[in-house]
Amino acid sequence: MPNQVRWFENLFLLSFCLGVVIGSLNWDYYLDLATPGYVLFVQVFALLFSLILIFSISRLRSNIARWVLVISFLLGIGIEAARLGDPTSAFGMHPLASILAAGQFLMQGLAVLLIVHPDTGEWIKA
């Protein structure tokens, strides 16, 4: 496994750890938007979906999973840009969670850049 793929996997797993902290800090904010069951369902579904993609890329060398992840991240950029354009969207969120979310987003962005590296593409196709 190339170093780019190791770093990709580690960065994404670390970003999930940050996600747990972010979710804990914003729990009350999320409960204002939805029921606890729905919030947990969305959190667990997103985590499992992402884990399946990450391990499909790093362990099974799935090119399809790689591009699904890239497209998902690009869609996330649009969602984050829309959220940042709405100043009322941050009200109620924990300030530390907002800072950690920015770090999480940067980690995932770096991980996506690593996975679209030409050497990674060659490794997946090998």
Image (cartoon, rainbow, N blue to C red):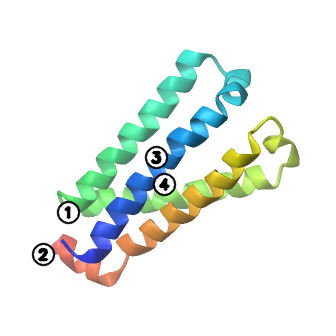
Q: How many marks?
A: 4
Which of pointers 4 and 3 lies earlier in the amino acid sequence?
A: 3
* Residue position for label 4: 72
Q: Is residue 51 left or right of residue 76?
A: left
Residue 112: x percent and y percent?
44, 67
- Residue at 69% of width from left, 54% of height from top? 99
In this rendering, which labeled residue sits more in front, label 4 or label 3?
A: 3
Label 4 Cα neighbours within 10 Å, binned few <14 / some 14-19 / many ≥20: few
* Residue position for label 3: 17
Which of pointers 1 and 3 lies earlier in the amino acid sequence?
A: 3
- Which label was assigned to residue 61? 1
Which of pointers 2 and 1 lies earlier in the amino acid sequence?
A: 1
Residue 9: x percent and y percent?
33, 60
Q: Quadrant of residue 114?
A: bottom left
- Residue at 20% of width from left, 63% of height from top? 61
Residue 19: x percent and y percent?
52, 44
- Residue at 50% of width from left, 33% of height from top? 43
In this rendering, which labeled residue sits more in front, label 3 or label 2?
A: 3
- How far apart, in angstroms, are the residues tagged by discs 3 and 2? 31 Å
Secondary structure of the residue carrying numbered label 3: helix
Secondary structure of the residue carrying numbered label 4: helix
Quadrant where the N terminus sits is bottom left
Q: Quadrant of residue 121?
A: bottom left
Tags 2 and 1 in contact by the CB under 8 Å rule? yes
Label 1 Cα neighbours within 10 Å, binned few <14 / some 14-19 / many ≥20: many
